[in-house]
Image: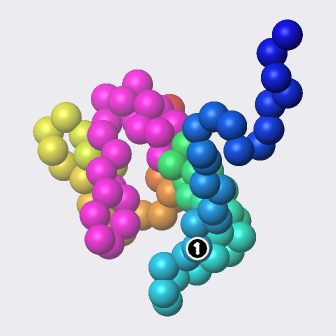
C-alpha cells in the first residue's frame, strides 16, 4: 500500500496572478474592447470575401477603407470609407 500523498510531494507549483504593467489597464477593462475588436475583424474578413467575389479588393489606410477594382482605381474615388459605407457599396454593386 502506498503512503498517503501530501501537498508538498511532487513538483512544486507556483500560482501567481499576473498583474497589469504600470500605467496599463486591468484585465477586466480590456474584455469589452476585445469583443468589439473581434467583431470588427470578422466584419472586415466578410467584406474582403464579398469584395473578392465581385472582383474588388478592400484596402485599409490611416484614413479609412477603400474598394479598389482590377485596374487599381478606387470605387467612387474614395479612400476614407467606414466599414458600414463599404458594406452598402458592396450591396449596391451586386
Q: Describe residue 87's horizontal placement relative to residue 67 as left or right.
A: right
- Residue 6 in view of the camera: yes
Q: Describe residue 73's horizontal placement relative to residue 10 as left or right.
A: left
Please give the name of the residue rendered at 31% of the width and 36% of the height, measured from the top-left corner.
56
Please give the name of the residue rendered at 51% of the width and 57% of the height, measured from the top-left corner.
83
Q: Give the labeled residue for mark 1.
A: 19
Q: Describe residue 19's horizontal placement relative to residue 70 as left or right.
A: right
Q: Is residue 13 above or below residue 82?
A: above
Mark 1, Cα crowd under 10 Å, few <14 / some 14-19 / many 20+, is few
**Residue 16 location (% of width, % of height):** 63, 62
**Residue 25 location (% of width, % of height):** 58, 80
Looking at this view, is 71 or 26 the one in front? 26
- Residue 76 in view of the camera: no
Does residue 56 belong to the magenta stretch?
Answer: yes
**Residue 20 location (% of width, % of height):** 55, 76
**Residue 23 location (% of width, % of height):** 49, 89
Please give the name of the residue rendered at 58% of the width and 38% of the height, measured from the top-left corner.
11
- Per the rendered image, the range of residues in magenta is 44-66
Please give the name of the residue rendered at 68% of the width and 37% of the height, measured from the top-left corner.
9
In the picture as drawn, the residue positioned furthest to the top comes out as: 1
Looking at this view, is 80 or 27 the one in front? 27
Amino acid at each position: 500500500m502506498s503512503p498517503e500523498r501530501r501537498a508538498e510531494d511532487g513538483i512544486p507549483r507556483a500560482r501567481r496572478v499576473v498583474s497589469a504593467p504600470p500605467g496599463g489597464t486591468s484585465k477586466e477593462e480590456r474584455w469589452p474592447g476585445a469583443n468589439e475588436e473581434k467583431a470588427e475583424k470578422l466584419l472586415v474578413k466578410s467584406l474582403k470575401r464579398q469584395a473578392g467575389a465581385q472582383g474588388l479588393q478592400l484596402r485599409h489606410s490611416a484614413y479609412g477603407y477603400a474598394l479598389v477594382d482590377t485596374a487599381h482605381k478606387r470605387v467612387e474615388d474614395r479612400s476614407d470609407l467606414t466599414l458600414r459605407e463599404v458594406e452598402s457599396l458592396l450591396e449596391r454593386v451586386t
